[in-house]
Amino acid sequence: MTDHRAVPAPRDPHAFIAGLPKAELHVHHVGSASPRIVAELAARHPDSKVPTDPEALADYFTFTDFAHFIDVYLSVVDLVRTPEDVRLLTYEVARDLARQQVRYAELTVTPFSSTRRGIDERGFMDAIEDARKAAEAEFGTVLRWCFDIPGEAGLESAEETTRLATDDRLRPEGLVSFGLGGPEIGVPRPQFKPYFDRAVAAGLRSVPHAGETTGPETVWDALNELGAERIGHGTSAARDPKLLAHLAEHRIPLEVCPTSNIATRAVRTLDEHPIREFVRAGVLVTVNSDDPPMFGTDLNNEYAVAARLLDLDEQGLADLAKNAVQASFLDEPDKAKLAAEIDAYTAAWPAS
Ligand SMILES: O=C(O)c1cccc(C(=O)CC[C@H]2O[C@@H](n3cnc4c(=O)[nH]cnc43)[C@H](O)[C@@H]2O)c1
Ligand SMILES: [Zn+2]
């Protein structure tokens, strides 16, 4: 008879991950609208083409390529029409993060997409700030903002985003960083240099998307032209050993979003995802969810994916969570506090 005790049971990391205190560094504001939030917004605006039935919504959130993803994304943007919609979305996104034990999140917000659709800029800023403060008080989750330029919308969007991010009368207290999103093909990064220079001069940190749908040269441009301190995705960096060595040497973290890369068809399968190459090259890897409901994922699932791809045990998962703390724009005392919370949780595992 086989002694089953001799065969270690495969570890199921889900329970550990569910309780692990985490930081989320790459997650989009509108892209975090859950079916529950979409239904609530659609009830306010019944002329929308976004389906509210969860099954139809799951079909709607199945993408043929990155361009299709952006079309669908913008149809959800169209659902957010008033400052009260912005507040609801932001507050409910924070609730969903808190449920996953996310203690700190840098949420990528695209103010241009809202102001060009007619939302008053003062109303927009007040709505996100009001939700941020309520979320921290009620859920204990600290939110910070990254304002991103939707690059494909042209330099008008870059000018407007920079103005909103640097005007002292408008700039929200929770704003820490400046980004660049949307499609990369046909949208060269260097043209955004003057806008990033102004944002950095105003004290914001540079975190553009790069190398999600184009090659490693876009990551080099993000580093050399935009002064990137972290890279959103950076997937194609795996094709350039010199770039990997540079990222490792200069401790430039990657915001890796594995399920997103499959959903937008930037990478064919999870097993082909370059996250292992990044770790092997000594790059500081953080794991993130990007647009979780649109990609049928959440941050906990991304940690489970990473555990499988990187063969992580509980300590490995705790180290991954601490990578995000280290790569975050929290101040040093708050980083130490969150890292200590992760250590205490891990030391007490399995909880009795
Ligand atoms: O708002 C507009 O009117 C508009 C006009 C032209 C182009 C755009 C965009 O390209 C918006 C892109 C939008 O997508 C967000 N996003 C969400 N997930 C990702 C991602 O994985 N990679 C790149 N961008 C992403 C981004 O934050 C922008 O808000 C808009
Ligand atoms: Zn993104």
Image: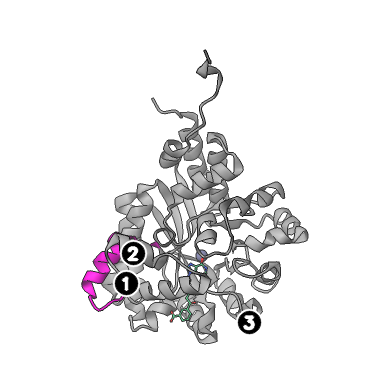
Instruction: Kindly identify the amino acid type of the residue bearing the numbered disc 1.
Output: Val
Are circles 3 and 2 on residues that touch, CB within 8 Å?
no
CA gap, disc 3 and disc 1: 34 Å
- Is 203 left, or right, of 135 in this rendering? right
- Is 139 left, or right, of 274 in this rendering? left
Which residue matches tag 2?
Answer: 57
CA gap, disc 1 and disc 2: 7 Å
Residue at (29, 63) in percent of width and height: 37
Which residue matches tag 1?
Answer: 50
> Which is more toward the observer, 220 or 280?
280
CA gap, disc 3 and disc 2: 36 Å
Percent position of residue 137, x then y: 31, 53
> Which is more toward the observer, 46 or 347?
46
Instruction: Kindly identify the amino acid type of the residue bearing the numbered disc 2.
Output: Leu
Q: Quick one: which residue is furthest to the front in this view?
A: 1
Which residue matches tag 3?
Answer: 191
